[in-house]
Structure formats: C-alpha cells, structure tokens
Image: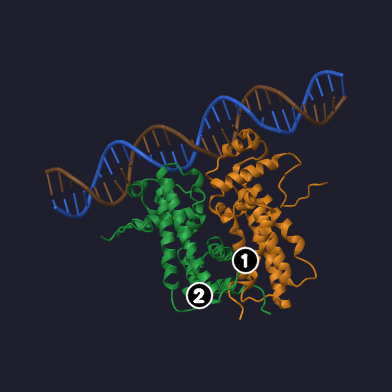
Chain colours: A orange, B green, C brown, D blue
Amino acid sequence: MSSEKNPLSPRIDKNGNLDILIAAAECFMEQGYHAASIDDVARRLGSTKGRIYHYYRSKTELFFDVHREGMRRNFEAVTPVMKGPEPAAQRLSAMFRRHALSMMENLALEAVVVQGVEMHRFSATTPEQRRTLAELMTVRNDFESLFKRVAYEGVEDGTIRTSDVSVAVKVALGAINWLSIWYRPRPSETRDDREILADKIVESIMQGLNAPG
Amino acid sequence: MSSEKNPLSPRIDKNGNLDILIAAAECFMEQGYHAASIDDVARRLGSTKGRIYHYYRSKTELFFDVHREGMRRNFEAVTPVMKGPEPAAQRLSAMFRRHALSMMENLALEAVVVQGVEMHRFSATTPEQRRTLAELMTVRNDFESLFKRVAYEGVEDGTIRTSDVSVAVKVALGAINWLSIWYRPRPSETRDDREILADKIVESIMQGLNAPG
DNA sequence: GGCTCACATACTACTTGGTATGTTATTTGT
DNA sequence: ACAAATAACATACCAAGTAGTATGTGAGCC
C-alpha cells in the first residue's frame, strides 16, 4: 500500500540502494555521465558491478533514477512554502531560498539534474527510454511552472514587477542552478553559512543590481 | 609577426580549420564531450578523422581549442563596452547584454564553454593537459573579474547596490550562461528577437523581481 | 621531379556496457 | 526446525565502440 504510482518516486525500498544513487550522482558530477563507468560507481561503493546491475537494468536507468531523486528533493524543498497568506513576492522568495539550499545540500544529485536531460535527447535509443525521457522533461517543466504560477500571482497582487514572467523565472532558476557549477562546500562549512549565501542569492534575484532611485 | 603569444588565440590560421572547431562544438553540445566521437565530428564535416588529427593532436586538445575560441568571442563581445564615461551600472548592463547576445549567436561554442572544464579536472592525464586546464580556468576567472570590476565601480559611484558583489556577479552570469541550456533559436528568428530577449534578461538581472516601493 | 601539405584509408589496442554464472546469506513454506 | 527458494551480491567474460597511429595518395609549389 505504500508504493503509489507516483512517477517521482525512485524505487528506494528501505534498503541501501540509495547508496548506489548517491555514488552514481557523485561519479556523474565529477566525470560526467559518459566518462563515469559503472565500475567507477562500483569502486566508490566498495563493491562491484554485480551489485548495481542487480538493481538497475542499465546505466541509462541508473541515470534516470538519480535524476528522479534529485527532482523529488527539489519538489520536497519548494512546495511547502508556495502557498499561504503572504504576498506572492514573499512566497516566491522563500521558494528560491529553499531551492538554493536544496542545491547546496544535494549537490551531487542536483548537478546530475542540471547536467541533465539535454545530453540524452540525441542518444536515447529504445522507445522506453524515450518515454522515460519525456517524463523527466515534463517533471522539469512542472517544477518551473510552480515558480511561474507564484510569479503570476505576484504580478496580480502587485508585489512583483517584470515585463516577462517566463523569462524572469528562467533567469532566476538559471542563477540558482548555476550553483552546481561553482559552489563547492568548504570542509568547515555550517548550515548558517549556506543560509547566508542563499539569502544573498535571493536578494540578487529579487532586488537586482541597480541602486534604487 | 601576426601570431602573438596570446593564450586566447586558437590557431585558426586563415585556413578552414575553424570549420573543425564549429563542427566539434556542435557535436559536443548535442551529445556531450565524451559521447561525441571524433568520427562523429568528421562525419559532420563530410570528411574523415585524418583531417582532424592533421590539425589536432588529441580530442582533448580539440576540446581545449573550442573552449578557447568560445572564451575569445566572449571577451570580444564584452570588452568594448566596459570602459567609458557612463555610470558603471549602465556599462555593466551593456556588458550583460552583449554577453547574452554572444551566448545566443555562438550557441554551440558557448555551450561547450559552459559544459566546461570541470569535467576534465579528474580525467586530465598528462602534465601538459593539466597546464592547459589551469590556463583555461584562469581565463574564465579573468572574464568574471571583468564584471566584478565594473560592479565594484558601480558600488563606488552609487549606481549599483548589493550586499555581495561577488555573489551578485555569479548570479547574473549564471542566469546568462543558463541560456545555453534552454535557448534554441527558432528558424524564423531575427536579430531583433534576440535583442528583445537580451533586454528582458538584463532587465531581470538589474531590476530584480520585486515591485518597487 | 622531388617535396610538402592536406587530407583519406586501414588497422590496433583498449575501454566499457552488459551478460552469464557462481556463491553465500536470508527469508519462507511446511 | 529444516529444506528450499530467493535475494544480494561477486567473478569471469564478451562484443562493440573508440582514441589514436601508421601508411597511402593526390595536388600544388619550388
């Protein structure tokens, strides 16, 4: 009864194949999907291919599940703050903030999400892979739509001003996703440090660079 | 006498190996560096490997030169507008605008730049490759520093307001670089369309999303 | 007529995704 | 409680693709 047909749930069935997802994400982040071999992932796990192919039928499926788990955590981070009595601009800020923090705290997974689906557009071979691919693209669009919806609410309630909501959201999400390129946690880093950084990013997105006047 | 020791100049010696760079960039953009084979690049050129290996000693060097050419065009686009009598905020806007247009008009090259150097951090084998890698990272940092410098000028002349110039610049450049992920030119697109899009992006970056007040 | 440039052709050594087959611990049916 | 089935891996192996090389070849130049 616990496993719904939610397309966002990887099959992490209480056991330790979440380890596999994390290890795969780290390898994909460091070397890129194609350069990282299954043996690399296994080595990082301290095991062999056998373990991975016991849970995943192909490298592609492994990648897809890493992507799913990353997107799942994105939704998990953002959805709790998107509704409420506050003005839309305030809720949107909270969403950006949460998303930025999620990027930092799930860096490997999110780097894979960013590295993303584009790569596979051309190399997806089997029809099943193409369907999965289409599904993942849909999930990404849905995620972006969450922000667009709240941004539109902000235009209506007067707390947000922009000439093109769609572009503005893409700009903001691009800025946050770009974290996966340049952000690397220092060893001594604390949660406070990350929150400070997230706040600065949100400030840049919401206030811009121009001095008021 | 024409070839200076400028690290930004790929060796495009009047002949047609610029074609190779473009074809390689397109392949790398579509399939990713590792998935794109030298034969793929050759096929796109309507020739064979022989031609490519006549000009480039390895796939890695080819990638590096694509990266160089992309960065060269970035500098070419931005540097002409970074100095002048205008207030810094205005010059910074112009730089962002030019950079965004450069992203759109050199999409393949810039996508490779974005896909970037990080990938090679782990797989760079020879000492020479490591040196080239370090060089490319330096060039990227220098490019970012261009924006930071003008942003600091803006803080001083009062036309720019932000709590952290470094983060703000990373946010802005991230937003622009993100174009390489989602922007794809429509067939009927004109230069005006691209300029309109660039203006919207610059507006988002400079004004933010919050309604003034 | 030789020499070099600008490629094309043919080939190799190696990597890598995937499979087929063990092997051991754990669960399950009775 | 015990055998049988199955889960959870490890080991050994192969076929396919690919970076790089060695060699050929025709056209232009000196």
Image coords of residue A155 (percent x, y): 69, 76
- Residue at the spot x=73%, y=56% of the render? A76
In the orientation shown, which residue stands out farthest toward the bottom?
A213
Question: Label 2 belongs to which residue?
Answer: B88
Is residue A60 visible in the rendered structure shown here?
Answer: no
Local secondary structure at mark 2: helix
The disc at residue B89 is none
- Residue at the spot x=65%, y=68% of the render? A203
- Residue at the spot x=63%, y=75% of the render? A162
Callout 2 amino acid? Ala
Callout 1 amino acid? Ala
Q: Is residue B148 above or below residue D11?
A: below
Q: Are discs 1 and 2 located on one and the same chain?
A: no
Give the Cα distance between marks 1 and 2. Answer: 23 Å
Is residue A22 visible in the rendered structure shown here?
Answer: yes
Marked residue chain, label 1? A
Left or right, residue A189 beside residue A30? right
Image coords of residue B167 (percent x, y): 58, 63
Left or right, residue B164 beside residue A91? left
Q: Is residue B160 above or below residue A19?
A: below
**Res B199 → quadrant:** bottom right
Q: Nearer the viewer, residue A195 or D25?
A: A195
Image coords of residue B186 (percent x, y): 52, 68
Marked residue chain, label 2? B
- Residue at the spot x=63%, y=55% of the render? A134
Left or right, residue B139 beside residue A22? left
| Circle 1/circle 2 CB separation < 8 Å | no
Image coords of residue B17 (percent x, y): 34, 56
The disc at residue A172 is 1
